[in-house]
């Protein structure tokens, strides 16, 4: 029996999950990572006894995360997921503070206390969104649309109408809430995946619903601990991972690749899974399609000799949120009065810093693209630190032991498309069938996973893209009658014997 050899370009979360799923189903898998470490966006900044997540911090869709890790063979005891009773607080410039909770009854009381009369709209929102979430999960999250006709069915069209994909998330929120602050509170979540609440399709309103329905969680030790967990599993299962190894090209015969070039050396392969930020594959496949990047971020990391007792997650809203979004997505200029997000993980995980100290993380949505030279924007950074100190963490400057700043210029230098922090933007024409799929081109043995690939960004969703890629590859490499979905936890060696 000849076992197919599959190469994976990139050891991001999508690449690692794909590798584990394929290996579990009997394939020979090798991973090539251009950097000196795995994880991609999921990584730590470690300094002087401090450790803080560099990228994703808000853990959503815990059931999806847990189920896919289980399917990939990752033991439950190797990682620890903690739920938050208080999800986060939103601070508005007029002094209004609105806190979101996992407990729905407590949330109803909070809404009536802060926004009297809006409780009925919230209940209607939760009822409608539950139906929409169940519909969207089955119709879109769990399906790949390699064949376009699989998307354009009467059933899917009806689902899109039901999900009101023709509306923006902000517009949909306004049909449930009359107060502009609440409309912002239930539409800003598209920023989690780099999308504009004023234009991102309303299907992404399922994110704020999921916060209440499924909770916000924290991975003990930091989100990026999953990287070491996955690497350990890959090592134990015999999956080879080569670091500082860039996939630079491929050799083709008709509509299939036969080899890839890694650091100038040709390696024979039977298939390739691309886990780099997707538009980067165009340099190899010569694809001419143009994409619009997600928003960028200015990220500020702090090690401080103090422990703040604020909520783990907080949002500080600008005076004019719509203007901030227009400056980021339309005008592509430095925001004049930006909203920002803060992360204070040491409150629930003191292992992240020396005793009595803490790490802090601040994210400011800014434009992607290379038209801003962030090395010349020290005034903006200083302005942000003043705002952070004034609104979030009092007397911060006097407590800072170290600080690091990461900008879209840094993100672009590291390989993220046009410095966007979340892959390509979740616009209507870059969502669903319009987004790159698990099988993204006419090449029959090239596949893709990652934040820019359907179904989109966010760690659990990227894991889902990995599952879709693995399923598609297994189907392609086996006789149709012998295909087994990776959900079955069964090997497909019987099918492989026919190759």
Image: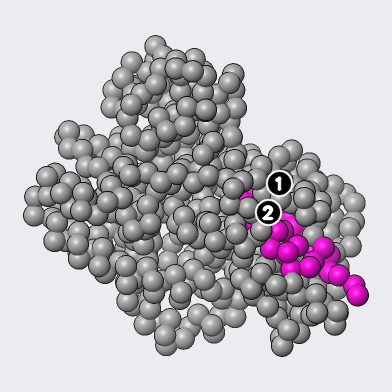
Instruction: Give the quarter of the figure containing the C terminus.
Output: bottom right
Q: Residue at x 41, y 46 (%)?
A: 83
**Residue shown at 79%/66% (left/top)?**
27
* Residue 17 inside the magenta-drawn segment: yes
Residue 141 lies, in percent from the top left, at: 49, 68
Q: Nearer the viewer, residue 195 or 70?
A: 70
The boundaries of the magenta stretch are 1-28
Q: Specify the farthest residue to the top.
A: 398
Asked if residue 489 is positioned above or below residue 56 in the image, the reply reads below
Q: Which residue is mark 2?
A: 16
Indicate yes or no whether the magenta region holds residue 233: no
Crowd tier of the residue under label 2, counting other residues whose Cα lies within 10 Å: few below 14, some 14–19, many 20 or above:
many
Contact check, label 1 and label 2, Cβ < 8 Å: yes
* Secondary structure at numbered mark 1: helix
Q: Position of residue 193 (x, y in %)?
A: 46, 52
Q: Is residue 434 left or right of residue 475?
A: left
């Amino acid at each position: 029996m000849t076992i197919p050899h599959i190469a994976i370009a990139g050891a991001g979360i999508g690449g690692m999950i794909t590798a584990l799923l394929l290996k579990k189903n009997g394939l020979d898998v090798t991973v090539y990572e251009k950097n000196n470490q795995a994880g991609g966006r999921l990584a730590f900044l470690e300094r002087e006894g401090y450790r803080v997540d560099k990228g994703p911090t808000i853990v959503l869709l815990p059931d999806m995360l847990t189920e896919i890790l289980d399917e990939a063979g990752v033991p439950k005891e190797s990682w620890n997921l903690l739920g938050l009773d208080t999800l986060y607080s939103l601070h508005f410039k007029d002094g209004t503070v609105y806190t979101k909770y996992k407990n729905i009854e407590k949330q109803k009381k909070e809404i009536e206390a802060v926004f009297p009369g809006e409780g009925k709209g919230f209940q209607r929102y939760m009822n409608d969104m539950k139906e929409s979430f169940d519909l969207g999960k089955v119709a879109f999250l769990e399906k790949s649309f390699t064949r376009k006709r699989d998307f354009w069915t009467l059933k899917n069209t009806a689902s899109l109408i039901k999900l009101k994909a023709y509306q923006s998330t902000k517009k949909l929120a306004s049909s449930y809430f009359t107060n502009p602050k609440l409309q912002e509170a239930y539409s800003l979540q598209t920023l989690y995946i780099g999308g504009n609440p004023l234009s991102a399709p309303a299907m992404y309103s399922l994110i704020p619903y999921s916060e209440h329905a499924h909770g916000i969680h924290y991975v003990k030790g930091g989100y990026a601990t999953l990287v070491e967990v996955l690497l350990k599993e890959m090592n134990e299962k015999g999956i080879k991972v080569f670091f500082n190894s860039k996939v630079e090209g491929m050799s083709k015969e008709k509509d299939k690749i036969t080899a890839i070039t890694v650091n100038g050396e040709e390696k024979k392969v039977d298939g390739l899974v691309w886990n780099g930020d997707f538009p980067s594959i165009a340099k190899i496949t010569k694809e001419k399609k143009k994409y619009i990047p997600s928003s960028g971020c200015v990220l500020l990391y702090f090690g401080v000799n103090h422990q703040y007792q604020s909520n783990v997650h907080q949002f500080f809203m600008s005076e004019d949120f719509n203007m901030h979004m227009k400056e980021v997505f339309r005008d592509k200029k430095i925001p004049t009065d930006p909203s920002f997000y803060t992360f204070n993980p040491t409150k629930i995980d003191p292992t992240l810093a020396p005793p009595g100290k803490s790490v802090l993380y601040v994210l400011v949505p800014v434009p992607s693209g290379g038209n801003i030279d962030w090395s010349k924007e020290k005034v903006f950074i200083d302005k942000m630190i003043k705002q952070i100190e004034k609104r979030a963490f009092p007397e911060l400057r006097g407590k800072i032991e170290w600080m690091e700043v990461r900008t879209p210029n840094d993100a672009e230098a590291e390989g993220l498309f046009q410095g966007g922090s979340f892959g390509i933007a979740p616009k209507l024409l870059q969502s669903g069938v319009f987004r790159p799929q698990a099988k993204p081109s006419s090449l029959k043995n090239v596949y893709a996973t990652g934040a820019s690939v359907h179904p989109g960004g966010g760690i659990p969703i990227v894991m889902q893209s990995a599952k879709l890629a693995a399923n598609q590859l297994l189907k392609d490499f086996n006789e149709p009658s012998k295909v087994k979905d990776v959900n079955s936890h069964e090997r497909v060696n019987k099918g492989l014997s026919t190759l």
